Amino acid sequence: MQKKRIIIVVIAGLLIIALAFVMINFKDLKNKGVAGFFADIFNPSAEKVLTAVTVDSESQEALAYEAHKNTIVYAGTQGVAGMNLSGEWLWDETSVSFLKPYIKSAGEYILVADLEGKYVLLFKNNVLVWKVEFPAGVISADINEKGYVAVAYNLENYDGAVAVIKPEANDDGSGKILFTNKINGEYVLSAVLSPNSEQVAVSGMSIEGETITGKISFINVSTGEIFSSINTEGNVFPAGTYTGKIDFMAVNANSLRLICRSHTASSDGDRDTDLWEKYSSYGDIYSFCVMNGQYIIVAAGNDVQGVYSSNTESRIVILDLAGNEVKTLKSSGTIKRVDSKGGIFAVSTDYHTDIYNSEFEKIYEYDTISEISKIIIIDENNFAAVTKKDIHILKAVSLNNK
């Protein structure tokens, strides 16, 4: 009887350990599958390669793709649609045709905007939440993980306007606009929403004679009013991103500038600081992204033979959030894009992509015969290479399991 009790206790203990092991490694197990997961455990050094499922584009022009969880979302002249990682179409929304589509995924939400067109759409878990029309044309659109959307757009009798839209719809299916800020005095180039939904960074420029002045303004989302502005003189910063809750990085062709502007209920909590500015010592900045909220990935180079010449060398410069250079990688040819998600980033030239992990080690590479537009990182084992002719849905598999 005592021996039987000991066996039961041992089995129960082993079951508890196994359950704990599965719970701790659930995400890895889900991503890799049972066979792939245990293959990695018993043969951790097994080499992996990317296998591809190729899906032809429905149109050769004006396409955009992005990943939302395990769905790849398409936007173009046929509307918006989603496919699974086997290339099978799952759903579509054909009420809007996009000529210059832009897609961004954030949390449970996905934003689809027609740049220079009229419409901005918000989806939640692949279901349309709202649609808003901007008759004079959309300049830029951004979304955070809370589902708030910032839109910069053209407005008659003004040099531009910025609106923030809530993640809920009105009864007629339009979005609930939190505020609209109408701007005169400078042309609006972009509007970027902070992760905490407290502020919007607006990039603009003014022209007087032959003098161009850049400007970065910050709008308080609670009031809809501009609370801080910076004139950047001859430097215009058309692009930017938040590296943290309130730290905004502005980028142009030759420099990066990290700025903090925050006004709180108590003036003791205000921060009005230029944290750092770094000029590229490697030539023009081609592309940039922020990886895992820890590193800034910058692609730069000197292309003396013409933009995107294949006879050149570019560098990937990795900075920490303090602006310190952590590592530099070289790439043959001019880098077209850098893309990142989580602790992975991808570096693409015209027809080749290298994928790196958080240790800045190259883990995969992939070649296409059509020019690469972007690399979508779905998770550590699933990717998509978007080209001008098709989309390659990529999966990392062990050579032992091919």
Image: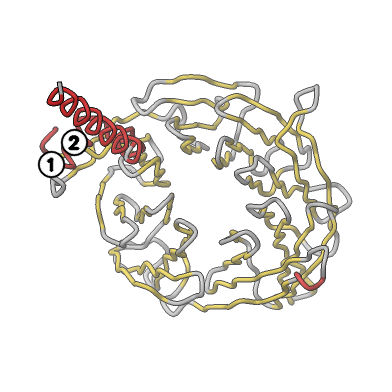
Q: Amino acid at mark 2?
A: Phe
Image height of 2 relative to 356, above or below: above
Assess whether mark 2 and mark 1 are in contact (beta carbons under 8 angstroms): yes
Image height of 190 relative to 264, above or below: above
Question: Which residue corresponds to the image point at 40% horizontal and 73% vertical from the top-left?
Answer: 302
Q: Amino acid at mark 1?
A: Phe
Is residue 383 left or right of 61 when viewed as pictured?
A: left
Is residue 35 left or right of 105 when viewed as pictured?
A: left
Residues packed near mark 1 inside 10 Å, few (<14), some (14 to 19) or many (20 plus): few
Image quadrant in which the C terminus is located = top left
Question: Which residue corresponds to the image point at 61% horizontal and 66% vertical from the top-left?
Answer: 250
Measure the C-alpha gap from mark 1 to mark 2.
6 Å
Q: Position of residue 218 (x, y in %)?
A: 75, 62
The residue that disc 1 covers is: 42
Residue ranking furthest to the right: 157
Q: Position of residue 125 (x, y in %)?
A: 56, 28
Residues packed near mark 2 inside 10 Å, few (<14), some (14 to 19) or many (20 plus): few
Image height of 207 relative to 160, above or below: below
Is residue 73 left or right of 268 when viewed as pictured?
A: left
Give whichever of 191, 98 is nearer the camera.
Answer: 191
The quadrant holding residue 12 is top left
Give whichever of 380, 96 is nearer the camera.
Answer: 380
The residue that disc 2 covers is: 38
Give whichever of 161, 276 is nearer the camera.
Answer: 276
The coloring applied to the image is secondary structure
Q: Secondary structure at mark 1?
A: helix
Q: Position of residue 314 (x, y in %)?
A: 35, 68
Question: Which residue corresponds to the image point at 70% horizontal and 36% vertical from the top-left?
Answer: 167
Is residue 280 left or right of 118 when viewed as pictured?
A: left
